[in-house]
Image (cartoon, rainbow, N blue to C red):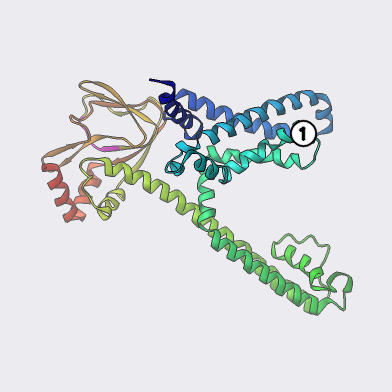
Amino acid sequence: MTAAASFPTWRRQIHLWIDHGAGDDLVATVLHRGLVVLICANVVAIVLESVPSIATRFGAGFQAFEFVSLLIFALEYAIRLWTAPEHARYRGLSPTRARLAYAASVPAVIDLLATLPLLFGLMGFGELKVLLLLRLLRFFKLGRYSPGMASLSAALTAERKALFACFVILMGVMLMAASAMHIVEHEAQAEKFGTIPDAMWWAIITLTTVGYGDVYPITAAGKAVAAVTAVLGLIMLALPVGIVATAFAQEIHRREFVVTWSMIARVPLFGGLDAAEIAEVMQFLRAQTVKNGAVVMHEGEPGRALYFIASGEVEILLPEGKRRLDEGHFFGELRFGDMAIASHSPCPNAAVATAPSKLLVLDPIDFHALTMRHPKLAEHIRTLAQA
């Protein structure tokens, strides 16, 4: 293979390593964990560097660590930019347009801003205080390696219109509260509520339930306005919290649903089922968590359930040898009347977890209840099993 022909292959491989990992690849695992440790170490160093006694004693070490970290982050950004054409989202674009599109994405902007202190330092502006904020942006790079933060980001993006509406409502309530307080208190406290802008400070800290106590009403009418504003503040806080919490739960459920759906649809027995029938099967799955080394199926024991691997790894023993299955695969056996329905042909003789794993189990009792509850589904499964 020529160098020109192998160039895209290498770019693809590097993209798998640095972007989302390539299965159980050791290089991807070490690379991702190393970057996470480096990001955390940078945040700790920035915090400790703000302590004068520590900065004086270890100043040279902090500077050397910062310089090395900036070089690594700059190299990471350059590699991500170079491999952008391999990203699934930009694969249909030309290399130049793919890189420009990636550079405009939020993760890439954070990466770029986090490396700007290196450029400013080379230009002689390394002492600017604003660079501290740019350095702290590295903390948000952890979002790339955290499924939870990715789910939260997706939830916020999905509910951005509702959250913006909450902000608009908050601004409207603040203006109304400030105007009402200005009307009833401006004569008693002209220096604090003499204008609506002055009263807006009181309104916003009351609505957000902060209540510093530096500004407060002294008239009966002002106290009545303050009481109503405080109650509205509780509502205004609960509204976005409820929206975000619901969206986050829905996002987690959606991700789990998609993963489970894809696993069930891959089983030959269920592959011909429609969306409603697969959803019915999903309702009967039971979650089971097993430790590393736990025996899921004993050798010689007949298959008594169908197992789906939601996470982790399981080694199954087949007549022709051992085989390792990871996330998204399935194994086991069910019986439908006098027919044995196996995930493999033949059914595995034994199964052992080779890593902490989460399994979704379809037991024979639940499978029987499923077929009894839905005769059409039972007939469909019988037809597929006999085919």
- Report the label total: 1
Is residue 167 placed above or below 64 in the rendered structure? below
- Quadrant of the rendered image containing residue 80: top right
Name the main secondary structure of what is drawn in magenta.
Answer: loop
Q: Residue at x 71, y 72 (%)?
A: 175
Number of other residues with Cα within 10 Å of mark 1, as a class: few under 14, some 14 to 19, many 20 or more: few
Query: Looking at the picture, which amino acid does disc 1 mark?
Result: Met
Along the horizontal axis of the image, is 342 left or right of 86?
A: left
- Find residue 165 and report its horizontal and vertical position in percent: 58, 66
- Find residue 136 and report its horizontal and vertical position in percent: 69, 39
- Find residue 306 and report its horizontal and vertical position in percent: 26, 38
Q: Is residue 306 magenta?
A: yes
Q: Residue at x 49, y 27 (%)?
A: 29
- Quadrant of the rendered image containing residue 364: top left
Along the horizontal axis of the image, is 163 left or right of 3?
A: right
- Find residue 192 and report its horizontal and vertical position in percent: 85, 69
Is residue 146 placed above or below 275 in the rendered structure? above
Q: Residue at x 46, y 31 (%)?
A: 16
Q: Is residue 290 magenta?
A: no
Residue placed most toward the observer, 171 or 359? 171
The residue that mark 1 highlights is 123
Which type of secondary structure does the marked residue at label 1 adopt? loop
Which region of the structure is painted magenta?
Answer: 302-307
User: Which quadrant would the C terminus be assigned to in this image?
Assistant: top left
Is residue 62 placed above or below 340 in the rendered structure? above
